Amino acid sequence: MRLETTTLGGGCFWCLEAVYDELRGVTDVVSGYSGGHVVNPTYEQVCGKMTGHAEVIQVTYDADVVSFQDILHVFFTIHDPTTLNRQGNDVGPQYRSAIFYHDDEQKRMAEETIEELTQQGLWNNPVVTEITAFEKFYEAENYHQEYFARNPNQGYCQFVVAPKVAKFRKMYMEQLKA
């Protein structure tokens, strides 16, 4: 087992966590905050748009089972990387599209993947995903962890998270955990 870690922001962390929890090779997904200037921010502070943090997930995965490129392809499938500081009705810098790379190889692969997807013309607008060196991760409050799994009938989960999970399952069926 060759464990690696990456930190991704693509809108609400509940959506990302729910998807990556089902990806084969992923051993842990934790919702939290990264990319800001306030130490130990709270959810309320991050939502107040004054901390500079993005809602992110920190993904630990077995690189012998799932590649960083696979992680990125899923990432670019389940959110819109062309909208600055928003995903759907979630608006603010905390919802920005961001890859917080943990080493030079992740940075290189993130840049190459964005270039490759841009060349394919998948989106009408340019990709605005921020590629930034990882500095610090702050774990979100306990009630945010495994939110979709614990609250599948909650309105936001039914109307926002569930469709993203369904799209992921359909497109990556062969990569789902058993």
Image: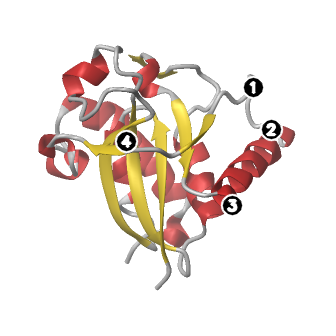
Q: Mark 4 points at which residue?
A: 15
Q: Name the residue under label 3.
A: 105
Q: Nearer the viewer, residue 159 or 58?
A: 58
Which residue extends farthest bottom?
Answer: 1
Q: Look at discs 3 and 4 and give the one toward the viewer.
A: 3
Whole-percent x, y for residue 78 in the image: 52, 43
Tag 1, which secondary structure? Answer: loop
State the quadrant of the C terminus: bottom left
Q: What residue type is labelled 2?
A: Thr
Q: Name the residue under label 2.
A: 118
Q: What residue type is labelled 4?
A: Cys
Whole-percent x, y for residue 30 in the image: 30, 53
Tag 2, which secondary structure? Answer: helix
Which mark sits nearer the N-terminus, 1 or 3? 3
Q: Distance between the residues labelled 3 and 2?
A: 20 Å
Residue 155 seen in this snapshot = yes
Q: Which amino acid does label 3 sit on?
A: Glu
Q: Nearer the viewer, residue 3 or 71?
A: 3
Q: Mark 1 points at which residue?
A: 126
Q: Distance between the residues labelled 1 and 3?
A: 23 Å
Q: Do the residues labelled 2 and 1 touch (CB within 8 Å)?
A: yes
Q: Distance between the residues labelled 2 and 4?
A: 23 Å
Q: How far apart are marks 2 and 1 (CA)?
A: 7 Å
Q: Quarter of the image holding residue 49?
A: top left
Q: Are marks 3 and 2 in contact (CB under 8 Å)?
A: no
Q: In this view, does 173 lie above or below 139?
A: below
Which mark sits nearer the N-terminus, 3 or 2? 3
Q: Which of 157 and 57 is in front in this view?
A: 57
Which mark sits nearer the N-terminus, 2 or 4? 4
Q: Quarter of the image holding residue 122?
A: top right
